[in-house]
Image: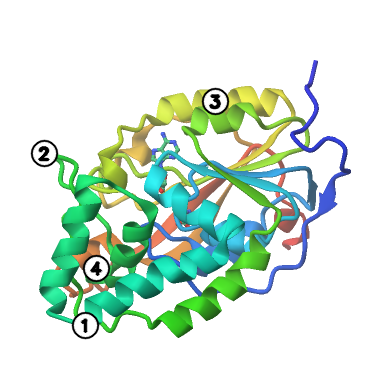
Amino acid sequence: MHQPSLFSDLTALETPEVTPFKTQLIKWVGNKQRYADQIIAHFPTSFGTYFEPFLGSAGVMANLAPPRALGSDVYGPLMEIWQCLAEDPERLISWYDERWTWFHAGDRQERYETIRSRFNAAPNGADLLFLCRACYGGVVRFRKKDGLMSTPLGSHPVVKPEKFARRVAMWRPRVAGARFEQLDYLDALECARTGDLVYCDPPYSHSQSILYGAQSFRLDRLLSAISDARDRGVYVALSIDGTKKSGNTYCDIPLPDGLFEEEHFVNIGRSMLRRFQMDGKTLEDEVVRDRLLLTYPSPKAAHEP
Ligand SMILES: C[S@@+](CC[C@H](N)C(=O)[O-])C[C@H]1O[C@@H](n2cnc3c(N)ncnc32)[C@H](O)[C@@H]1O
């Protein structure tokens, strides 16, 4: 028997028309904000609660602006940022302002390293917020050997507190329907009920092993949890790396027969990680297309010729 949705007292809501919203609050590798409208176009036209269990920088959620949602990620300091935005946006602005002001009042290199050391000694959302905006390329990465955040200071101007405050004001209403929790995706998926929608954007197992605190990730576990959710009547959309020539093994993993009904491609531009590894140089041929797998028929496909 299907269990009721997390917010079962409310009826299913229509997917709103999505006008692309590209202003980023935080920088995070794998951010999908610029392509979110392409992804959302394949969401069901009507669903219950929206779940985003690999939330990262919430690029898709911010575009969807769901009336009710559970946003979660296994990385605690990141979830502190989202919880602070939801519960006390003024505090989030102060976190940023204090660090930005102190950083600019002395030797920036030294002060950046001080904030990074403090963060590494006691990981927390307030320092992560500043580090992700100030670090090189906005690529927060962690050393494999000890898990410490190692990205150096970037050479770009760090967004001013006034501008950051305006972004907070833009973002806050877009996530007003969401609850935020630090959760492993398996626990988040278990909360989804009939008619709910789950969008999964997991870490890419090989190319992203130095990112996101170097958590281990197994695609087969995720696929099995997706299968269970689908059997409960949950709609699931899964983004996975679609580049075949990168050597990413996702493309070689056979997907269980019948788990997904449709596959679409989303053009996500050039690979951020490659740009970072090549010290600012880009590869002309590194255009990346993500695969979007759906356990349900896409409403967009129905309208395509
Ligand atoms: C590709 S990123 C998601 C990017 C996101 N779509 C955005 O727009 O920023 C993958 C995320 O999965 C998270 N993650 C890794 N392992 C996880 C797990 N076991 N459970 C939940 N989240 C996990 C990482 O911390 C990271 O934020």
Q: Where is residue 169 in the image (x, y as percent from the top left)?
A: 60, 74
Callout 3 crowding tier (Cα within 10 Å): few <14, some 14–19, many ≥20: some
What residue is shown with label 1?
105
> What residue would you read off at disc 4?
135
- Tell me the number on the disc at residue 225: 3
Residue 186 spot, x, y in % from top left: 51, 28
Q: Nearer the viewer, mark 4 or mark 1?
A: 1
**Residue lying farthest top?**
1
Disc 3 is placed on an element classified as helix
Q: Which element type, helix, strand or loop, lies under badge 1? A: loop
Determine the CA span between mark 2 and mark 3. 30 Å
Q: Mark 1 or mark 4, which is nearer the start of the sequence?
A: 1
The residue at 12%/74% (across/down) is 109
Please tell me which of labels 1 and 3 falls first in the chain: 1
Does the Cβ of the disc 1 residue fall within 8 Å of ligand 1? Answer: no
Does label 4 point to a residue whose CB lies under 8 Å from ligand 1?
Answer: no
Please say whether residue 257 is visible from this viewpoint: no
Element type where label 2 sits in the image: loop
Q: Earlier in the sequence, mark 2 or mark 3?
A: 2
How crowded pointer 2 is (Cα within 10 Å; few <14, some 14-19, many 20+) is rated as few
Residue, disc 2: 145
